[in-house]
Image (cartoon, rainbow, N blue to C red):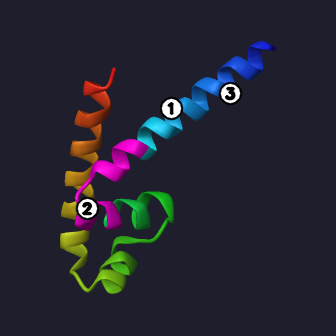
Amino acid sequence: MSAHAGHEGDRIAGELTLSDAIERLPASLRQVFVLFDVEGFSHAEVADLLGISPVASRKRRSRAVSILQSILRSSR
């Protein structure tokens, strides 16, 4: 196995851990996080899609990031 392959495995394992953490988020926070951070929508677009205000989108994303950081820290 090459050194590159080992690093590739670490990266994939990290992505799976993040994916698991995202799945643990409450649905309302997960929706905003995925639309904004994964799909690349703006907060205005997320707000339109979900029927919320852009301010609510930003707040939900902030809460999602805080929870994800906590989940990932505790899984180390």
Which range of residues does the magenta coloring cover?
A: 20-31
Circle 1: element type: helix
Question: Which residue is depicted at the point 26% across and 64% down?
Answer: 27
Q: Amino acid at mark 3?
A: Glu
- Mark 3 or mark 1: whose residue is earlier in sequence: 3
10 Å neighbourhood of mark 1: few (<14), some, or many (≥20)? few
Q: Quadrant of the C terminus?
A: top left
Q: Is residue 15 above or below residue 48?
A: above
Question: Could you classify mark 3 by the number of other residues whose Cα lies within 10 Å: few (under 14), some (14-19), or many (20 or more)?
Answer: few
Residue lying at 22% horizontally and 81% vertically, measured from the top left: 52
Q: CA distance from mark 1 to mark 2?
A: 21 Å
Residue 6 is situated, as x and y percent measured from the top left of the image, at 69, 18
Identity, as a three-letter code, of the amino acid under mark 1: Gly
Q: Which residue is mark 1?
A: 14
Relative to 55, residue 23 above or below: above
Q: Position of residue 64 (x, y in %)?
A: 25, 52
Q: Residue 48: x percent and y percent?
A: 33, 86
Q: 6 above or below 37?
A: above
The structure residue drawn at horizontal position 41% and vertical position 71%, both measured from the top left corner, is: 42
Q: Which residue is mark 3?
A: 8
Disc on the earlier residue, 1 or 2 = 1
- Mark 3 touching mark 2, by CB under 8 A? no
User: Which residue bears the numbered disc 2?
Assistant: 29
